[in-house]
């Protein structure tokens, strides 16, 4: 089941596919060239240090709201994702609020941010 179907269970398969197709390139863009560190720093600067620390740490991920994720990734990123996925900005922010903690957590399995070069090499392997 896609993230979009979890966030909006009444969404059709076509909309879910559009969201899924837009997520891959967006995530690659968000994490490469120091982007992962910027997301964590952005969360901390937005008063979400506990949440960011939970994503990097080895415990459970603390949630964020769609509004909070806008401060982490920026309004332009939310709008761009919404346009590419064919959904509203609010829906895009809600999807990203579900995805961002898992992305950060998945890229920090040992509780440490990887070196930017290592992360860029990983993203490049997947075509990003």
Image: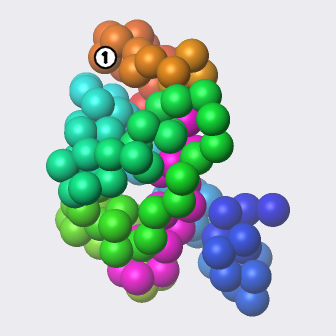
Q: Residues within 10 Å of mark 1 (few under 14, many from 20)?
A: some
Residue at the far front: name it. 50
Residue 101 at x, y percent in the picture: 51, 48
Q: Is residue 50 left or right of residue 16?
A: left
Question: Please, is residue 47 above or below residue 112 in the view?
Answer: below
Give the residue at x 25% y 27%.
34
Q: Is residue 39 left or right of residue 56?
A: left
Magenta segment's dominant SS is helix
The magenta stretch spans residue 64: no
Give the residue at x 32% y 53%.
48
* Secondary structure type for disc 1: helix
Q: Which residues are magenta?
A: 89-105
Give the residue at x 43% y 49%.
51
Quick one: quadrant of the N terminus? bottom right
Query: What residue did someone put label 1 on?
Result: 116
Q: Is residue 22 left or right of residue 93?
A: right
Residue 66 at x, y percent in the picture: 42, 72
The magenta stretch spans residue 97: yes
Quick one: quadrant of the C terminus? top left
Question: Please, is residue 117 above or below residue 73 in the view?
Answer: above
Please say whether residue 30 is visible from this viewpoint: no
Question: Please, is residue 6 above or below residue 41 in the view?
Answer: below
- Total marks drawn? 1
């Amino acid at each position: 089941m896609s993230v979009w179907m979890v966030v909006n269970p009444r969404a059709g398969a076509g909309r879910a596919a559009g969201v899924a197709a837009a997520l891959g390139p967006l995530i690659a863009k968000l994490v490469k060239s120091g982007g992962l560190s910027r997301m964590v720093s952005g969360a901390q600067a937005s008063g979400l240090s506990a949440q960011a620390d939970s994503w990097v740490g080895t415990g459970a991920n603390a949630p964020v709201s769609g509004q909070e994720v806008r401060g982490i990734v920026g309004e332009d990123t939310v709008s761009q994702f919404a346009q590419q996925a064919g959904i509203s900005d609010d829906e895009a922010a809600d999807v990203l609020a579900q995805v961002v903690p898992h992305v950060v957590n998945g890229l920090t399995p040992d509780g440490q941010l990887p070196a930017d070069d290592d992360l860029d090499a990983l993203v490049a392997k997947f075509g990003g």
